[in-house]
Amino acid sequence: MEEIGKRRLAAAAIALAGIAYFFACARPLPKTLVLAPGWARALPAAALSAAPAAAPSGAAAPMVIDDRSVATLETKAGPGSTGFDKGASGFPYALAGRYGYFDAQGLIASADAAPFGLAQSKGAYIAYDRLPESLSLRSAGGAELARITEPGYPFFAAGRLFLLRPGQASVAEIGPDGAALWSRDFPSIVTAFDASEELALFGLMDGSLVGVGPKGAELLSFSPGGSRIAGIYGCAVSPDGEMVAAVSGLDRQRLVVLERRSAAYRVTYHRWLESDYRRPVAMAFTGDGSYLAYESPTGLGLYDRAARREASLSAARLASVGEYLADRGLLLLLEGGGAEKGVLIASPAGRRLFTAPFTASEAFVSRSGDAVFLGIAEGGGAASILRMDLKEE
């Protein structure tokens, strides 16, 4: 009996010690990341008018949705910008043959029928036909800001407007009055493009990269080389203009990253890739410039600017390289091919944290703060925009 009593006393002492350790040294369990449902709004049938209704006011700044194959990661207009997005509110969309703007409360401000082409940012847009002889530059509210009287194909980036002229070997930046701020002729056709406030970056079919400053001066000229077939299939410039990157060449294809050192850009990283893309490659720097995200055969490649090393994120086919939630250190992506798609949240280290699958023929994802907006197009022309809020539980 005495021996049993001693064992019970020892067990009680161990239990008390464990409880004391729990209260003294306990740490909270990691919270689960969820997308809480907000609202869902069906898009109205597209009108045939040339201009949408007035844009909503009071909404947070959205991601730019433009006509390039690469959706940009948060780019904010600043002193060096021509200012098309300054003071803009509301969120642009282009979905199911219509385009327009909506606000954070779910008001669909406009739904116009999309013509042959559309260049759209959060502050302005241009809708145009197959062979435009002139272009009408309009505010998000539909008011005509200017008329561009020369032919070409427009596109927005970093609050700036550019015009690719017929032949695809000449580009001009267009000011608020519709006139060219500068013009540049290239020896080969333009195959890739990106811009920051201070640098417009052009990739050419002949395999060269050309960087142009806000006044038209050449700031960068570089040919990566090393491949049997030259060509630039994707390029990106960091928001501060200090870094550029490109996917270049065929047989073999490689990633090249350059950083500005004094007055010149120098190669700081390069790697041969497993890809053999013969089409535009999606790539972009995150809004704070910390990471480069680029399309890869297995999902997404992620280059860490500070550490100068890469991670990879396994994903189904990417619809875009997505957005970076800098305040949370997370990536927001849209993945999937065909009708099976999903919203994916991941870490820059390549860890998948959250997936919300859905079915749609077309889709887009954007965000403002912790609000995530998902556009979904279904069969028969039906389309909706949904709001979800990123929360921890």
Image (cartoon, rainbow, N blue to C red):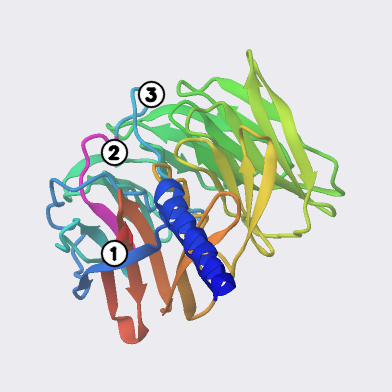
In the image, 138: left or right of 195? left
In whole angstroms, how far apart are the C-alphas of marks 2 and 1? Answer: 25 Å
Decide if residue 332 is in sight here.
no
Q: Which residue is mark 3?
A: 80
Q: Which residue is mark 2?
A: 85
x and y, in percent, of residue 51 in the image: 19, 56
Question: Of the numbered discs in the image, which one, if any, rests on residue 313?
Answer: none
Residue at 60 percent across and 50 percent down: it is 349
Numbered-mark total: 3
The amino acid beneath tag 3 is Gly
**Does 156 sit above or below residue 36?**
above
x and y, in percent, of residue 306 in the image: 61, 32
Mark 1 falls on what kind of element? Answer: strand
Kindly report the secondary structure that dominates the magenta region of the rendered protein.
Answer: loop
Q: Closer to the N terminus: mark 2 or mark 1?
A: 2
Mark 2 falls on what kind of element? Answer: loop
Q: Closer to the N terminus: mark 1 or mark 3?
A: 3
